[in-house]
Image: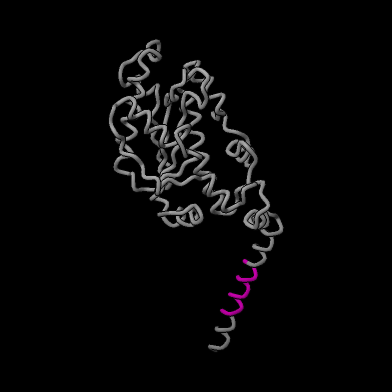
């Protein structure tokens, strides 16, 4: 079992054992939900090592079922059932791998929400992903960089610290609006962009290049390593190593004469 405290060490050592997951839904609050759980709109899973990405999305499932766009709203349960069934068929044989997520920790937003929707639509128990293999990337970043590594909302703020937002990125409120407007492709694209960001930030963290707002020792080391002075010292060290190597070669040749 991988702990968040050694997450970066383990994913560097065994990248093939990790999957990244994120999903979008109708919304997180009661507006427009009639007191019911939010419907799932898309789930995206990426194999970290290869970057291969699989989407389970409303618009693609509707097309597979032959449901026209103007019938999606009235046949949504049928589409969502297909979406969740295909996701759990994919996850079933990979349940013992490590699943990296962002705050998917409860019934409001999390693996439990996906499980609840599956039970509601099928009357069956899903092949659940064990709690022990779920790794919250937000928690792993807090351990590495300190609790102040980015302000709220952390994901968006961390993105902005490292460059402009992806054009596909949607906030929670924007996702809820997109759902009301039937913009399912936008919802799926936003979810894909977030999973891609997870992979990018992990790789940046592993080479000490992730920019954060924290004041921990890890932040200090990363900033020092990224500075111009550090690069010059690295170049000087490399040059010195080359010169010492040449000196030793010449010394050996002279001693052989």
Q: Main secondary structure of the magenta part?
A: helix
The residue drawn where x is 39% and y is 23% is 58
Furthest-right residue in this view = 229
Choose top left, top right, bottom left or bottom right for residue 234: bottom right
Q: In the figure, is residue 94 to the left or right of 139?
A: left
Image vertical order of residue 251 relative to residue 167, above or below: below
Q: How many marks?
A: 0
Front residue of this view, candidates 115 and 64: 115
Image vertical order of residue 184 relative to residue 152, above or below: above
Image vertical order of residue 171 relative to residue 232, above or below: above
Q: Which residues are magenta?
A: 238-249
Furthest-top residue in this view = 70
Q: Position of residue 194 (x, y in %)?
A: 51, 36
Find out whether residue 173 is within the magenta segment: no
Which quarter of the figure is the C terminus placed in?
Answer: bottom right
Residue 184 in view: yes
Residue 50 in view: no
The residue drawn where x is 58% and y is 86% is 254
Render colour scheme: one colour
Front residue of this view, candidates 92 and 206: 92
The residue drawn where x is 55% and y is 84% is 252
Q: Position of residue 199 (x, y in %)?
A: 49, 43
Q: In the figure, is residue 154 to the left or right of 58?
A: right
The residue drawn where x is 29% and y is 43% is 93
Q: Position of residue 168 (x, y in %)?
A: 54, 28
Image vertical order of residue 52 relative to residue 71, above or below: below
Which quarter of the figure is the N terminus placed in?
Answer: bottom left
Front residue of this view, candidates 249 and 171: 171
Q: Position of residue 35 (x, y in %)?
A: 46, 21
């Amino acid at each position: 079992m991988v702990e968040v405290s050694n997450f970066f060490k383990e994913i560097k050592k065994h990248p093939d054992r990790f999957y990244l997951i994120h999903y979008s839904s109708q919304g997180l609050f009661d507006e427009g939900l009639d007191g019911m759980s939010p419907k799932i709109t898309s789930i995206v899973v990426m194999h970290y090592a290869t970057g291969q990405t699989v989407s389970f999305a409303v618009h693609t499932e509707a097309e597979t079922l032959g449901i026209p766009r103007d019938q999606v709203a009235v046949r949504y349960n049928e589409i969502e059932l297909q979406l969740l069934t295909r996701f759990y068929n994919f996850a079933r044989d990979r349940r013992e791998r490590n699943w990296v997520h962002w705050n998917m920790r409860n019934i409001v937003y999390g693996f439990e929400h996906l499980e609840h929707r599956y039970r509601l639509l099928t009357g069956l128990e899903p092949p659940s992903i064990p709690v022990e293999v779920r790794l919250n990337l937000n928690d792993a970043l807090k351990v590495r960089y300190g609790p102040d590594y980015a302000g709220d909302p952390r994901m968006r703020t961390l993105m902005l610290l490292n460059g402009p937002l992806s054009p596909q990125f949607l906030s929670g409120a924007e996702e809820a609006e997109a759902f009301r407007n039937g913009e399912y492709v936008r919802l799926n694209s936003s979810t894909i962009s977030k999973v891609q960001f997870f992979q990018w930030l992990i790789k940046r963290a592993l080479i000490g290049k992730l920019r954060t707002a924290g004041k921990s020792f890890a932040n200090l080391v990363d900033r020092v390593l990224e500075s111009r002075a550090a690069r010059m010292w690295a170049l000087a060290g490399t040059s010195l190593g080359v010169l010492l190597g040449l000196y030793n070669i010449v010394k050996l040749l002279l001693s052989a004469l």
